[in-house]
Image (cartoon, grey):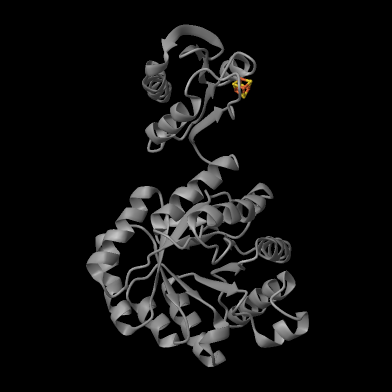
Amino acid sequence: MKNTKQVKIGNITIGGNNPIAIQSMTNTKTSDREATLAQIKSLSAAGCDIVRFTVNDMAAAEAIPYYVENTSIPLVADIHFDYRLALAAAERGISKIRINPGNIGEKENIKKVALACRERNIPIRIGINGGSAEKSVLVKYGGPTAEALAESALINAQMLEEFDFTNIVLSVKSSDVKTMVDAARILSERCDYPLHIGVTETGDVRRGNIKSAIGIGSLLLDGIGNTVRVSLTDDPVNEVHAAKDILFCCGIGGGINIVSCPTCGRTESNVIGLVNELERATRDIKTSRRLTVALMGCVVNGPGEAKHADIGVACGRNEGLLFRKGEIIKKLDESEIVDTLVSEIKELINA
Ligand code: SF4
């Protein structure tokens, strides 16, 4: 991972060698305390590390102390257009502020926000999106290109630096996967601020997960990215599940890696059904270890994969051979396969 500056957001630190944090955003009215707190808690329970909400009016800002009192997860205020809302959020215990200086207006107002945040050690994320980069930069590059997004972020970071403010996180997002990836790579080369990464406005779960996996995954494999957000037009809890899966598939963090074959004409057990059942049964198992569980359809690749996994089954006709660390343990009836794998996984985790 690229060794960026460290930034403290509430009770967590990002950047440096700290773990990559998962972020999501509520879609309730922030002024609706009951609904928003319930969603913050659901996100936290799903594995979210940082929750952002919009602070789009004073009623939303007034609710911040309620959330600070009732949850320990770091909270980020998303501010557009009105710098006074950023000041109100800073005064009410927010852990981080996300602004796009381009739509905050007067430099003097941005300075007021920077000073209020500096006084309280609150970091600011400069979030540049394809639709909100400075006009002059868009004209220079002929549109929201990767260069334009990165340059816009750096110009805004320099403005905060002029106010002696360096407690900064940067993000450059686009709904175009390649533009987002290229922009983040440019930023990563040109500065040492921690980066929040994600593809924005991705669409529904199916396509959104794929765009996010490609965009966020490409950067994580390059060692770029300190916080991640999967942005979906859906329940934000699904953003957290997707972010966890992307991190895991990039080799980050613990979990259960299920290796299963695509099935073919040789398959003589209901491997698709078994794998779906096994995914459901293991989804909520929490472990810091990475365990590989193989569920293979036949003897062609089955025993080989099952042997190399921590635990595995190579299926035959309505049955399977159970392997543990390369050793054949026993023959299982098809109906026993999932339960046996789950109890073997739990045993390995607790060993
Ligand atoms: S492991 Fe066997 S059943 Fe599965 S795809 Fe390969 S040959 Fe087919």
Where is the C terminus found, in terms of image quarters?
top left
207 vs 332: above or below: below
Q: Which residue is drawn at 47% across and 23% down?
A: 270
The residue that appears at 45% across and 86% down in the rendered structure is: 83
Q: Is residue 11 visible?
A: no
Q: Where is residue 248 in the image (x, y as percent from the top left)?
A: 54, 41
Residue 335 showing in the rendered view: yes
Q: Where is residue 327 in the image (x, y as percent from the top left)?
A: 54, 8
Compared to 62, does 107 lie above or below?
A: below
Q: In this view, does 188 lie to the left or right of 109?
A: right
Q: Which residue is pictured at 33% across the width and 69% down the height?
A: 28
Most distant residue in the front direction: 265
Residue situated in front as seen by the camera: 121 or 170: 170
* Residue 247 place in picture, x, y as percent: 55, 46
Q: Position of residue 5 (x, y in %)?
A: 60, 60
Q: Check the image and name the residue furthest to the left.
A: 34
- The quadrant of the rendered image in which ligand 1 is seen is top right
